[in-house]
Image (tube, helix red, strand yellow):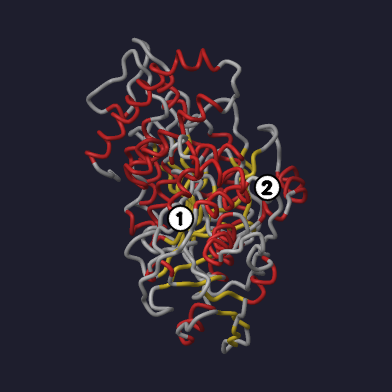
């Protein structure tokens, strides 16, 4: 394809097709993006909806965000996009497997965003608005699936489109000749620029029955090359088990605020801490992590380098809960480039996230409907992204996640796995305690799906959930799984019941 060239005032070469606003493109080149387009405003919004048959509710960008001037989107048309020349060369351009430019452009932008560490942005007004209609044939659909996903996902698409349709099967078999892509070239993270100014950082540590681990993290924070101005510890350790003298403010080179939590739940703990944070940035960490000396400095420099307000760092799982920072360094040396990519974040982890206080306050904090369950950090991150903040993945700031065998807020949440009289009710049960039927999946995770993706994608998730339940393990054991299917349906419906009750209650931060 023919690409035009534009040189920005800083001397960078941008390649483009169509007729972009070059002044706007100069502005964008100074920001976090690598590829820009106006696809959703030109008739390509939510193009290729069949991506839901693979991604359902597990990909932040499965549907285009609404009412945002700039946001991540892979719905890029071939005749109206711009890309940094270096990124185009690193990714190798459009995949020659595809003959249809429309599906080739979608494939390029999808993989750039999801797998290759590029930031692909929809920008309203970069290109003139238009009424487009991407022409994607049934065969193109299956070619996309054959190139990008395992065979089971294409079979599920046949299931959803209608397994009795000859055309679907014919396209599936024709496309199956295309080899599955395994290796993706990855965009190299930008070199970190020198820090500008002296922004203040507040670091939040929620902890419960792990005071020794919290103290180890406080010592790591004391050793930072760029120290936090404030650390807020929210400790839910029962009064009979805790030692309040351990948190001696005079022992640390930062302001130490300790809140003895009387409420229940990690979401409430973080919100209580957010309320007293004073820093320009808020760092979120678990109590069972270790961080190297350049952790905070690299988070600040990463956000400044990329001109954005939120990042998710590398959360590295320890082999054993006694591992130290030497083990983290060893693990990072062995990582492949794909494991250290930057780009648009696709999840948020409360064990390692760094967000401007402005962005945190724009969503009000964590949704306490998640207390006692799972999914709160992903909800928090996606909620921030939906305000227009370009949430990035930062490979320069890594923590070692120790995962000790005891303690932590999951002590409360573990009750959700039980039934019977000994079970302690969880906050998400509201006025309807769980009795004989344990809801599966977790009702708070189902609430996340309903809240962030809506009933249409939850419906697809339901189909995918039971399709995989029946067929993922092959034909062996299938009769037994069929016999258990009615009860699994009851469990799923019960989970959905609680999720809808939480939806009716609405997001809460207090």
Q: Is residue 75 above or below residue 29?
A: above
Q: Nearer the viewer, residue 405 or 83?
A: 83
Where residue 100 sits: x, y (%)? 56, 64
Name the mark nearer the viewer: 1 or 2.
Answer: 2
Q: Residues within 10 Å of mark 2 (few under 14, many from 20)?
A: few
Which quadrant of the figure contains the C terminus?
Answer: top left
Q: Is residue 322 above or below residue 329?
A: above
- Can residue 29 be seen in this snapshot? yes
Disc 1 is placed on an element classified as loop
Q: Is residue 363 above or below residue 151?
A: below
Residue at 46% from the left image edge and 31% from the top image edge: 465
Give residue 186's mark: none
Residue at image mark 2? 177
Q: Is 317 situated left or right of 415 in this image?
A: right
- Can residue 226 be seen in this snapshot? no
Quadrant of the image occupied by residue 104: bottom right
Residue at 47% from the left image edge and 82% from the top image edge: 20
Where residue 89 sits: x, y (%)? 69, 71
Residue at 43% from the left image edge and 38% from the top image edge: 162
- Give the number of marks: 2
Disc 2 is placed on an element classified as loop
Residue at image mark 1? 48
* Distance Cα–Cα, label 1 vs label 2: 21 Å
Q: Earlier in the sequence, mark 1 or mark 2?
A: 1
Q: Nearer the viewer, residue 311 or 227?
A: 311
Residue at 70% from the left image edge and 34% from the top image edge: 319
Where residue 328 sits: x, y (%)? 71, 45
Quadrant of the image occupied by residue 124: bottom left
Q: Nearer the viewer, residue 471 or 71?
A: 471
Q: Residues within 10 Å of mark 1 (few under 14, many from 20)?
A: some
Q: Is 103 situated left or right of 442 in this image?
A: right
Q: Nearer the viewer, residue 139 or 482?
A: 139
């Amino acid at each position: 394809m023919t690409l035009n060239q534009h040189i920005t005032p800083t001397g960078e070469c941008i390649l483009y097709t169509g007729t972009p606003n070059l002044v706007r493109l100069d502005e964008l080149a100074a920001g976090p993006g690598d590829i820009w387009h106006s696809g959703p405003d030109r008739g390509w919004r939510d193009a290729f909806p069949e991506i839901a048959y693979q991604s359902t509710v597990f990909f932040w960008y499965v549907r285009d965000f609404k009412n945002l001037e700039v946001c991540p989107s892979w719905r890029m048309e071939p005749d109206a996009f711009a890309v940094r020349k270096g990124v185009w060369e690193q990714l190798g351009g459009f995949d020659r497997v595809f003959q249809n430019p429309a599906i080739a452009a979608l494939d390029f932008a999808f993989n750039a965003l999801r797998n290759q560490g590029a930031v692909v942005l929809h920008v309203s007004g970069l290109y003139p608005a238009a009424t487009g209609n991407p022409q994607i044939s049934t065969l193109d659909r299956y070619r996309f699936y054959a190139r990008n996903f395992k065979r089971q996902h294409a079979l599920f698409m046949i299931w959803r489109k209608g397994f009795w349709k000859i055309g679907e099967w014919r396209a599936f078999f024709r496309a199956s000749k295309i080899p599955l892509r395994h290796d993706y070239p990855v965009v190299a993270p930008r070199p970190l620029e020198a820090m500008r100014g002296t922004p203040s950082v507040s670091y939040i540590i929620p902890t419960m029955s792990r005071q020794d681990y919290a103290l180890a993290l406080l010592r790591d924070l004391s050793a930072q090359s760029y120290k936090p101005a404030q650390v807020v510890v929210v400790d839910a350790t029962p009064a009979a088990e805790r030692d309040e003298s351990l948190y001696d403010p005079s022992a640390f080179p930062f302001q130490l605020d300790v809140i003895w939590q009387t409420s229940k739940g990690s979401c409430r703990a973080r919100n209580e801490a957010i309320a007293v944070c004073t820093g320009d940035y808020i760092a979120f960490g678990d109590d069972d992590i270790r961080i190297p000396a350049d952790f905070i400095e690299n988070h600040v420099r990463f956000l400044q380098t990329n001109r954005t307000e939120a990042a998710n760092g590398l959360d590295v799982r320890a082999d054993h809960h006694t591992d130290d920072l030497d083990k983290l360094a060893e693990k990072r040396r062995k990582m492949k480039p794909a494991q250290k990519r930057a780009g648009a974040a696709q999840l948020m982890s409360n064990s390692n996230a760094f967000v401007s206080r402005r962005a945190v306050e724009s969503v009000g904090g964590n949704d306490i409907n998640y207390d006692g369950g799972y999914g709160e950090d992903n909800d928090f991150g996606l909620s921030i992204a939906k305000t227009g903040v370009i949430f990035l993945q930062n490979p320069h700031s890594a923590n070692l996640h120790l995962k000790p065998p005891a303690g932590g807020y999951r002590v409360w949440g573990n009750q959700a796995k039980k039934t019977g009289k000994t079970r302690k009710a969880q906050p998400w049960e509201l006025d309807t305690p769980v009795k004989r039927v344990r809801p599966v999946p977790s009702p708070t995770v189902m609430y996340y799906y309903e809240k962030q993706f809506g009933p249409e994608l939850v419906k697809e998730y339901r189909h995918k959930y039971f399709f995989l339940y029946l067929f993922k393990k092959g034909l062996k054991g299938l009769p037994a799984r069929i016999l258990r299917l009615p009860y699994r349906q009851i469990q799923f419906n019960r989970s959905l019941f609680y999720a809808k009750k939480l939806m009716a209650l609405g997001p809460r931060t207090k």
